[in-house]
């Protein structure tokens, strides 16, 4: 089991460890027991993950004499709302969960975001632990302490910054992950290669078949590298006011495509189209060499992700959605562009005409 330290604030308890390995679930009970974080632990999980791993995690916790129970909610983004938050909090109260308790998020990004949010507001906050089970959650949403829920007006509009006390990444969980969910998470790994790590990018280019076959050694390498990149960025900019924005590479246009499609295009595919569009914009603005843009497009395709925008999605709708991007400040969008693979920068002034032209090209 590899341990990576997330150093946030030396004065406080915000710093924590990410433990990564294959088949480590049986060992996390002991690590949690040694941490002595709480008198009881409530696992929050969705219906799919509960059926697969719910009993197992309870067994692991109870084996080391920890008091543990589980609350399940229906799987899917549709559950990431205030109703679920209220249902979970009322259940916690009914079961007598108090300020000496902690929550454990067992699941994908939806579970992590809801659990982190509940833990940050329940009885003015109790600790929580992340046990991410999707590739996306293991390399991205499980790290960084962003919590949240959706509103009818948009995604992630209510939330908090609240760091988990520990993150346990068991690569074995990925064995049961459906293909489309696995590929969804790969888009974030590709993004890390593009914004931060040329070596990771090159590894992804050379090993795309092994990755898609979920070779355990390669998975360990790419998940670990991705975690190090995310934690490094979070350490510098925990509250998302500076370099953490680089993590948004491809997401401004990606989120707009996702929303304009009525969420029929998956997040991973939308981000991939967004990354290719943004690489093209960077090339057209004479920042990014054409060779790098071609490599990005080829890697996205090799990873099994979408490299074209469906013609059925209105370009004007995509443009209009970029204007309502959550990361916008005043009238300017902090667009993350590229100088080369591994070197992103922010630029607030990308002409709408250039975005329009690029999206039209990606429909061909
Ligand atoms: N907090 C952050 O920093 C951050 C970052 C990125 C994304 N997010 C959020 O993450 C969410 C998406 O996360 P996600 O893609 O993990 O979705 P998800 O949590 O809905 O999981 C996807 C599906 O996989 C199932 N699943 C999970 N683990 C499984 C396993 N091991 N085996 C079989 N099935 C499994 C789930 O039940 C679900 O049906 C979005 O709500 C997004 O806003 C948050």
Image (spheres, rainbow, N blue to C red):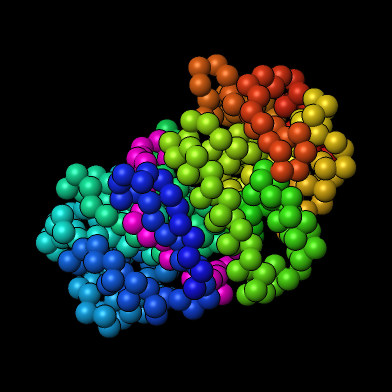
- Residue 108 visible, this orientation: no
| Quarter of the image where the C terminus is located | top right
x 36%, y 79%: residue: 56
Q: Say which of 266 and 219 sits in front.
A: 219
Q: Say which of 313 and 336 sits in front.
A: 336
Magenta region, residue range: 156-182
x 27%, y 83%: residue: 63
For residue 41, above or below residue 51: above
- Residue 304 left/right relative to 271: right
For residue 288, above or below residue 56: above
Residue 127 image position (x, y, % from top left): 27, 55
For residue 79, above or below residue 211: above
x 74%, y 50%: residue: 198
Residue 239 image position (x, y, % from top left): 43, 36
- Residue 134 left/right relative to 64: right
Q: Say which of 342 and 63 sits in front.
A: 342
Is 159 a magenta residue?
yes
Please tell me how many numbered marks the rendered image carries: 0
x 72%, y 27%: residue: 355
Residue 32 image position (x, y, % from top left): 31, 69
Q: Residue furthest bottom?
A: 63
Residue 231 image position (x, y, % from top left): 51, 50
Q: Residue furthest front?
A: 10
């Amino acid at each position: 089991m590899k341990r990576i330290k997330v150093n946030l604030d030396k004065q406080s308890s915000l710093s924590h460890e990410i433990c990564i390995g294959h088949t480590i679930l049986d060992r996390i009970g002991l690590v949690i027991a040694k941490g002595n974080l709480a008198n009881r632990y409530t696992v929050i999980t969705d219906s799919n993950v509960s059926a697969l791993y719910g009993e197992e995690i309870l067994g692991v916790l109870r084996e080391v004499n920890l008091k543990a129970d589980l609350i399940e909610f229906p799987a899917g983004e549709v559950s990431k709302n205030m109703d679920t938050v209220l249902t979970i909090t009322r259940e916690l109260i009914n079961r007598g969960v108090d300020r000496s308790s902690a929550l454990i998020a067992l699941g994908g990004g939806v579970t992590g975001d809801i659990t982190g949010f509940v833990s940050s507001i329940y009885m003015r906050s109790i600790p929580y632990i992340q046990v991410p089970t999707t590739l996306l959650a293991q390399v991205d949403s499980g790290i960084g302490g962003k919590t949240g829920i959706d509103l009818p007006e948009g995604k992630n509009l209510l939330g908090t910054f609240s760091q988990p006390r520990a993150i346990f990444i068991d690569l074995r969980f990925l064995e049961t992950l459906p293909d489309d969910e696995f590929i969804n998470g790969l888009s974030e790994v590709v993004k890390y290669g593009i914004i931060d790590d040329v070596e990771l990018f090159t590894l992804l280019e050379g090993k795309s078949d092994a990755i898609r076959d979920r070779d355990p050694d390669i998975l360990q390498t790419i998940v670990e590298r991705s975690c190090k990149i995310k934690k490094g960025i979070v350490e510098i900019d925990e509250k998302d006011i500076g370099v953490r924005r680089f993590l948004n590479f491809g997401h401004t246009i990606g989120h707009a495509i996702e929303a304009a499609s009525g969420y029929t295009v998956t997040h991973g595919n939308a981000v991939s189209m967004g990354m290719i569009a943004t690489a093209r914009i960077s090339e057209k603005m004479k920042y990014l060499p054409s060779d790098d843009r071609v490599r990005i497009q080829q890697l996205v395709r090799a990873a099994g992700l979408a490299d074209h925008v469906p013609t059925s999605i209105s370009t004007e709708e995509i443009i209009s959605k970029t204007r309502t991007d959550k990361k916008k400040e005043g009238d300017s969008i902090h667009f993350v562009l590229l100088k080369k693979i591994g070197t992103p920068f922010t630029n607030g002034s990308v002409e709408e005409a250039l975005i329009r032209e690029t999206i039209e090209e990606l429909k061909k």
